[in-house]
């Protein structure tokens, strides 16, 4: 039996069970909070007055967050008032506690219930990624420039500091045991003097050891290095798994954090980036830009450290947007930006949640006007009385944008198809000119303000979603409080059983329909995947031969190096630059991914909903039906309103689970292939490793 459809079915069934269990909490809430005797005084007026205040807040306040702040104040008053209620029976005490708990959880929305938007930033060192982030944040020299070699060599996360006014870095380090194991691997790489040696891995190992331990440390035996004083210092340094740097002044912070994210070849020793798993940098006073956003500076992933590669891939799938950064002088001809796009598109689109890809060309002010005029055939008449440098910059910006858009259109059909649901934009920016007082360019012409507006727009959207969700929760709580009327007890006791049975029946019917939809989705995907499996069996050798193992540009020696690298790294090998990205598992998964693509994107669309989408079917689940004629009393009307707000909240949370499960389902094809081929990789690596011995 083919294991891939079975694995797929298991994930769908698990999703269905989670959905059922979560939705059923609505039913238990209704059953649990039914008071027998009510002895409240002016609770109804609390609810009516508060509801009116919220409606007023929605109409009079001009910003979403102002609405939310005002609503929080109202709910604080409600919470204080309800806490004063005494002398009530046990059912009402339970209900009171539940309402207090709901209000308390509402106040945690900023920290617990809202996932930030992640923007992944790619680009080779020296192409201006760090300077770009500095310019967007208006923080010159905050992150070290890429001209210093392997500068942004670790995953660096930049977000707003919402706690205080300090610049803060949270640095996650490898443990002493992890680093010792990595050192063993690094020295094994350095000891390889065969003709088949992987030169990139060799240089990477040398770079790491000299960065930490100093010049010529790579020439020592590991036993010699362990006797060195510096080795003991590093071991002691790694006794803490995390290091926190917090400074009031930006310059002090930049100086202290540099050694964890920067490396200078000219001054080896004392650079700690090889010891770092990840860095989270928090910037004060940038709420408008980054309150709900994470900027993720992702380095190239050529590394003999699989832990860092795994972290890289997991972060990639979190990105809702991607910025591909390259020097404007190389944006068209450089292979790296297009290598990034080709390799990452599976994890960004169907395997991720990316909705937008922006190509950002940097260093637009780095231009020789005379040479550019000759090369582009710009005449002095076309420039007229305008600033010659500015005209050349803007002319090159325009032609570069046009060229990149044409190149996107001319991508191979496979990559282009995967991008069809993802929007693309092109920006031409100058970080240096943005900070310069007397620049040839106006601030708007540097296009840094355009990127700032992109961030502000994302923040406004999330603010709006948060405010809408909070106000909805508040109205739901106030609806529930409406039942605290001394005149409703007899009515509630009389109709409790009927209401409960009706809602339970509605829930049962809704989940039955959801089950039917789940089964139909599985059957459709299973059919497509089975066809893809047959194609893979028939074409796998030819595909691997063509794409990875023996392309035309690799000689016999390169052929064996490629095989050796693939077997050593369980089917994948990513070089330090993007022009050599190999993944045999993904290559073998291609035909299966192609076969399920259309159906998969109907069920899990990147943008919006379709008639087949799982999210649409979840949205249709409700225990509140239009035929609920029994809910004619005001009391039951308010209970129904409360349940509806809880349903909506659960659906938002389920939407997040759907996206995460979608990623697992899509990646399960390649991971299953890797697992099945694992013994083959392990068996063939020793043979290939000894080929030229």
Image: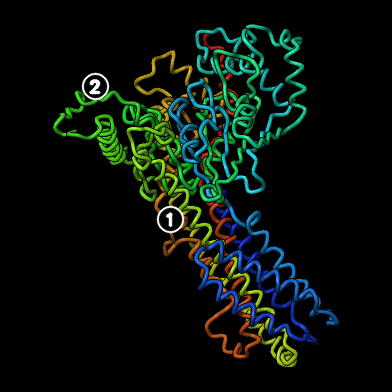
Query: Can the viewer see residue 290 in this picture?
Result: yes
Mark carried by residue 607: 1
Query: Can the viewer see residue 339 in this picture?
Result: no
Where is residue 202, by image quadrant? top right
Residue farthest along the right direction in this orientation = 87
Pointer 2 residue: 371
The residues tagged by marks 2 and 1 sit, at their Cα atoms, a distance apart of 44 Å
- Going from N to C along the chain, the mark reached first, 2 or 1, is 2
The nearer-to-camera label among 2 and 1 is 2
- The residue shown at (73%, 15%) is 231
Residue farthest along the left direction in this orientation = 381
Label 1: few (<14), some (14–19) or many (≥20) C-alpha neighbours in 10 Å: few
Q: Position of residue 359 (x, y in %)?
A: 38, 38
Q: Position of residue 444 (x, y in %)?
A: 36, 43
Give the quadrant of the C terminus: top right
Judge by depth and name the residue closer to the eye, 608 or 527. Answer: 608
Where is residue 167, by image quadrant? top right
Q: Position of residue 306 (x, y in %)?
A: 60, 29
Label 2: few (<14), some (14–19) or many (≥20) C-alpha neighbours in 10 Å: few
């Amino acid at each position: 039996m083919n294991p891939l459809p079975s694995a797929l079915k298991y994930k769908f069934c698990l999703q269905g069970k989670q959905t059922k269990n979560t939705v059923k909490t609505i039913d238990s809430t209704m059953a649990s909070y039914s008071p027998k005797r009510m002895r409240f005084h002016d609770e109804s007026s609390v609810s009516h007055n508060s509801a009116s205040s919220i409606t007023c807040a929605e109409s009079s306040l001009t910003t979403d967050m102002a609405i939310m702040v005002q609503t929080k104040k109202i709910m604080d008053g409600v919470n204080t008032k309800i806490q004063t209620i005494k002398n009530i029976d046990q059912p009402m005490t339970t209900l009171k506690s539940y309402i207090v708990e709901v209000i308390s959880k509402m106040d945690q929305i900023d920290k617990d219930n809202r996932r930030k938007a992640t923007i992944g930033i790619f680009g080779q060192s020296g192409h201006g990624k760090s300077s770009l982030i500095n310019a967007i944040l208006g923080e010159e020299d905050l992150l070290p420039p890429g001209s210093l070699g392997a500068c942004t060599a670790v995953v660096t996360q930049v977000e707003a500091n919402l706690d205080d006014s300090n610049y803060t870095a949270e640095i996650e380090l490898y443990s002493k045991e992890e680093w010792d194991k990595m050192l063993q691997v690094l020295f094994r790489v350095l000891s390889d003097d065969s003709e088949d040696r992987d030169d990139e891995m060799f240089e990477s190992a040398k770079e790491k050891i000299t960065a930490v331990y100093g010049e010529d440390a790579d020439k020592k035996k590991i036993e010699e290095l362990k006797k060195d004083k510096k080795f003991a210092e590093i071991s002691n340094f790694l006794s803490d798994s995390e290091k926190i740097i917090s400074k009031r002044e930006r310059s002090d912070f930049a100086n202290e954090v540099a050694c964890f994210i920067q490396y200078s070849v000219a001054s080896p020793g004392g650079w700690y980036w090889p010891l770092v798993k990840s860095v989270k940098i928090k910037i004060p006073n940038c709420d408008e830009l980054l309150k709900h956003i994470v900027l993720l500076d992702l380095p190239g992933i050529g590394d003999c450290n699989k832990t860092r590669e795994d972290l890289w891939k997991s972060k990639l799938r979190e990105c809702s947007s991607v910025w591909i950064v390259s020097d404007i002088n190389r944006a068209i001809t450089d292979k790296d930006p297009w290598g990034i796009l080709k390799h990452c598109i599976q994890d960004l689109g169907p395997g991720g949640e990316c909705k937008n890809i922006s190509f950002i060309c940097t260093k637009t002010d780095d231009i020789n006007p005379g040479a550019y005029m000759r090369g582009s055939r710009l005449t002095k008449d076309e420039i007229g009385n305008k600033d010659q440098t500015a005209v050349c910059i803007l002319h090159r910006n325009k032609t570069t944008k046009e060229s990149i858009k044409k190149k996107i259109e001319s991508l191979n059909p496979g990559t282009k198809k995967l991008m069809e649901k993802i929007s693309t934009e092109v920006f031409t920016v100058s970080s240096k000119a943005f900070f310069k007082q007397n620049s040839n360019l106006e601030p708007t012409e540097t296009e840094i303000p355009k990127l700032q507006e992109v961030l502000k727009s994302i923040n406004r959207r999330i603010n709006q979603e948060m405010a809408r969700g909070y106000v909805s929760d508040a109205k739901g709580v106030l609806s529930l409080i409406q039942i605290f009327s001394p005149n409703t007890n007899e009515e509630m006791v009389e109709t409790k059983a009927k209401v409960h049975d009706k809602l339970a029946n509605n829930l049962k019917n809704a989940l039955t329909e959801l089950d039917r939809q789940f089964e139909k989705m599985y059957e459709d995907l299973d059919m497509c995947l089975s066809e893809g499996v047959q194609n893979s069996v028939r074409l796998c050798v030819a595909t691997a031969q063509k794409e990875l193992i023996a392309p035309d540009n690799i000689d016999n020696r390169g052929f064996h190096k490629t095989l050796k690298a693939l077997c050593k790294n369980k089917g994948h090998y990513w070089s330090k630059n993007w022009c050599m990205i190999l993944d045999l598992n993904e290559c073998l998964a291609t035909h299966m991914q192609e076969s399920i693509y259309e159906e998969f994107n109907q069920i899990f669309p990147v943008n919006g909903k379709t008639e087949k989408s799982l999210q649409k079917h979840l949205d249709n689940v409700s225990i509140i039906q239009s035929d609920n004629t029994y809910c004619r009393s005001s009391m039951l009307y308010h209970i129904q309103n409360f349940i509806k707000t809880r349903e909506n909240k659960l659906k938002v949370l389920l939407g997040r689970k759907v996206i995460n499960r979608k990623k697992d389902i899509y990646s399960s094809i390649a991971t299953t292939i890797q697992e099945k081929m694992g013994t083959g990789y392990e068996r063939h690596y020793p043979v290939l490793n000894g080929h030229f011995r």
